[in-house]
Image (cartoon, helix red, strand yellow):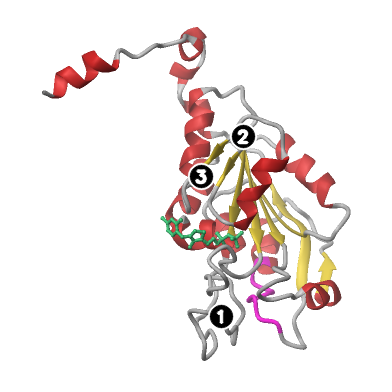
Amino acid sequence: MVTGIGCHAKLYDYIGTSGIYGLHGRVLPVSMGVKLGNKELTVIGFGGDGDTFAEGSSHFLHASRYNVDMTMLVHNNQLFALTTGQATPTSPKGFKGKSTPDGFFERALNPLGTALINGASFVARSYALDPKLSELIQQAIKHRGFSLIEIIQPCITFDDTREFVSSHSYQTKHDTTDLQAALKLSQEWSYELDASTKIPMGLFYKQSRAVYTDNIPQLDGPLYKKKHTPNLIKIFDEFY
Ligand SMILES: Cc1ncc(C[n+]2csc(CCOP(=O)(O)OP(=O)(O)O)c2C)c(N)n1
């Protein structure tokens, strides 16, 4: 597993598996590197909404486009939590935090729509308090391709939206192979928290297509498994 930097990244300390605390915003390039290094590994990236949709937004586009065979779980609490509550690209309008004392006024990003339009092959939204989330995560891990789950996970310290999310969400029922239907769903919630809000939850889209490593025949065969012990002195000498 690979994490970003933020409250979500603490997860790494609770899961007994091999992994890396990445850098803020760099979950995806590190995850892709792990997958290229050994494509037999199951790679799961964990990021915050700040991590993935702000600092890491460019990586997010390209991971969707490449259809890297990995799972990305975004813990969306609609704010930068570890740095004590600043606005992110998915903060709700009017959000008052350290960086927006007069209220957040920007239009939100549409991360699920962005992932869909750029080729992510498994796109879903769920809620941290939904007991079925673990099944969805299993489905995402088993999917061959870039699987993304946006997990709405309210920050109970800086903006506790648990009650709001619980009472404004609903489970989608549609053909999950229909890209247009998925795109429409992705536009239903603009991250605002007002009375008319309806938050679609569930699997938006699933499709099967070639993954990034399918086009890199060099990764087949024993070469990547070979243990290399780099001679650092020799490498440094080349530069002096
Ligand atoms: C390159 C870089 N930029 C900024 C920071 C400061 N920083 C550390 S954690 C964090 C906020 C994390 O927010 P988010 O990714 O939404 O995760 P959360 O804490 O909400 O789980 C920021 C801005 C950093 N460590 N590195």
The CA span between labels 3 and 2 is 10 Å
Horizontal placement of 85 versus 161: left or right?
A: left
Instruction: List x then y, in percent, for residue 126.
Output: 76, 59
Going 47% across and 27% down the picture, which residue do you hit?
215
* Number of residues whose C-alpha sits closer than 10 Å to that of mark 3, classed few (under 14), some (14–19) or many (20 or more): many
- Secondary structure at badge 1 equals loop
Q: Quadrant of residue 191?
A: bottom right
Give the amino acid type for the residue marked by disc 1 in the picture: Gly
Going 52% across and 30% down the picture, which residue do you hit?
34
Give the amino acid type for the residue marked by disc 3 in the picture: Leu
Q: Which residues are magenta?
A: 186-193
Q: Is residue 207 visible?
A: no
Q: Nearer the viewer, residue 180 or 43?
A: 43
Instruction: List x then y, in percent, for residue 224.
Output: 47, 15
Q: Earlier in the sequence, mark 3 or mark 2?
A: 3
* Number of residues whose C-alpha sits closer than 10 Å to that of mark 1, classed few (under 14), some (14–19) or many (20 or more): some
Q: Is residue 42 visible?
A: yes
The CA span between labels 1 and 2 is 34 Å
Going 48% across and 79% down the picture, which residue do you hit?
99
Instruction: List x then y, in percent, for residue 228.
Output: 41, 11
- Secondary structure at badge 2 equals loop
Residue annotated with mark 2: 43
Location of the C terminus by quadrant is top left
The residue mark sitting in front, 3 or 1, is: 1
In the depicted structure, whether residue 35 falls above or below residue 55: above
Residue annotated with mark 1: 97
- Residue 28 — which label? 3
- Residue 162 — which label? none
Q: Nearer the viewer, residue 29 or 109?
A: 29
Going 50% across and 83% down the picture, which residue do you hit?
100
Do the CB atoms of the residues marked 3 and 1 lie less than 8 Å apart? Answer: no
Query: Does the residue tagged 2 have its C-beta within 8 Å of any atom of ligand 1?
Result: no
